[in-house]
Amino acid sequence: MPKLIRITTVPLSLKLLLAGQMKFMKAQGWEVIMVSSDGREVSQVVKNEGVRHEVIPFTRKITPFQDLKCIWQLYNLFRREKPDIVHSHTPKAGLLGMIAANLAGVKIRIHTLAGIPAMAAEGGKKTLLESAEKWTYANATEVWPNSQGLYKFVLNQGLTNEAKLRLIGKGSSNGVDLERFRRESLKENHLVAATMRIMPGEDDFIILAVGRLVKDKGIEELVSAFVNSKIVSMSKLVLLGAFEQELNPLSQETIQTIREHPKIVQIDWSDHVSHYLALADVLVHPSHREGFPNVLLEAGAMNVPVICSDIIGNTDLISQQKTGLIFPVKEASVLKEALEFAYVKREKMAQYADNLYNLILEHYDRKKIHQEIFNNYKRLLKAAEMVE
């Protein structure tokens, strides 16, 4: 029975970004172990996936002594468990996991790349983060960028050689659950609860953004574009995500606007994203950096029109005025015009949403992505056996 260890920095990533993958691999007869830091999501993800979880006390910040301690704990875990494959996801888990797996002699070491923090960094921090990426890739036997754009970026920046890179399907780390993200699957009580939290007016145009409320998710530009738009009095901006002021904080002015503006609703988080999408007239994703954003797949599966920034990841899925609207990253004035266009040209936006839905059905069904990942695991195991 092959043994697989999946690692993310925090358990929320196991729950949201990799949902169903561990369960799928277990159903193929594999032994699967999940690894992340501790957190309230651990018990839920163990229940959902039906596999064991081990705690390694990762931090998301730069903490050299704690990081060395984590490498040592990972090394001991790998030596004890003797996995056939270690597969990491998220930057810190990738760096420490790949180093430890290499030191422990694990033959197949995969890192899925879903965004590069250095893209949005500057100065000395950018140099440090780029070095961390190179260390991660150097210690991995394969690197799986989750979009064509990221694949090209890694090559162009010389972060690793092409022989190590592989794109799974057309991109995405986990596809989209087409059973969950469809209007027929919605539960009436959750829909009522979402409606009560938004409290929309009878004719309000609902603009939804999903994700952490931090600067590099483009929240400052979105809030500015919304409050300065011609449609502010006929609309409501719903921000589904919590403030994270430790890393990459929003300006105090933006926070104050979010908290005090009568047409902005902020909701810390919900496991019922599909119900908020069902109430939305448009999904806006103004992020400064991405790998391959799940929320665009989810919106597309729900037939919700999309407006997004012109960054790697977003533009791997969205084509201008074909499957959505694209605006130049950080350009609040152009985003404002896009919001106004979406309000006026609803039939056009609905056509873009239909086109996106058809694209997702063809290429991004979660079941297909899981099978593709499993096929690649088998390919690597076979290659490793031949070397022996």
Image (spheres, helix red, strand yellow):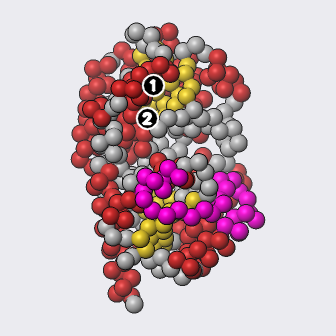
Question: Which x, y percent locates residue 115?
Answer: 51, 52
- How many residues crowd around disc 1 within 10 Å: few (fewer than 14), some, or many (20 or more)? many
Callout 2: SS: loop
Say above or below: 138 vs 253: below
- Residue 29: tell me if it is visible: yes
Q: Residue at x 70, y 42 (%)?
A: 246
Residue type, label 1: Ala
Between 157 and 260, the one nearer to me in the picture: 260
Question: Which x, y percent locates residue 234?
Answer: 45, 10
Q: Magenta region: which residues?
A: 43-70
- Whether 52 is among the magenta residues is yes
Q: Residue at x 62, y 55 (%)?
A: 38
Between 329 and 223, the one nearer to me in the picture: 223
Say above or below: 264 vs 384: above
Residue designated by label 2: 272
Question: Which x, y percent locates residue 206?
Answer: 43, 20
Q: Residue at x 69, y 53 (%)?
A: 61
Between 10 and 282, the one nearer to me in the picture: 10
Contact, CB < 8 Å: mark 1 with mark 2?
yes
Res 79 → quadrant: bottom right
Q: Quadrant of the C terminus?
A: bottom left
Residue designated by label 1: 194
- Whether 62 is among the magenta residues is yes
Question: Which x, y percent locates residue 202?
Answer: 40, 9
Res 223 → quadrant: top right
- How many residues crowd around disc 2 within 10 Å: few (fewer than 14), some, or many (20 or more)? some
Callout 1: SS: helix
Res 346 → quadrant: top left
Give the mark nearer the N terminus: 1 vs 2: 1
Residue type, label 2: His
Q: Residue at x 39, y 54 (%)?
A: 20
* Figure label count: 2
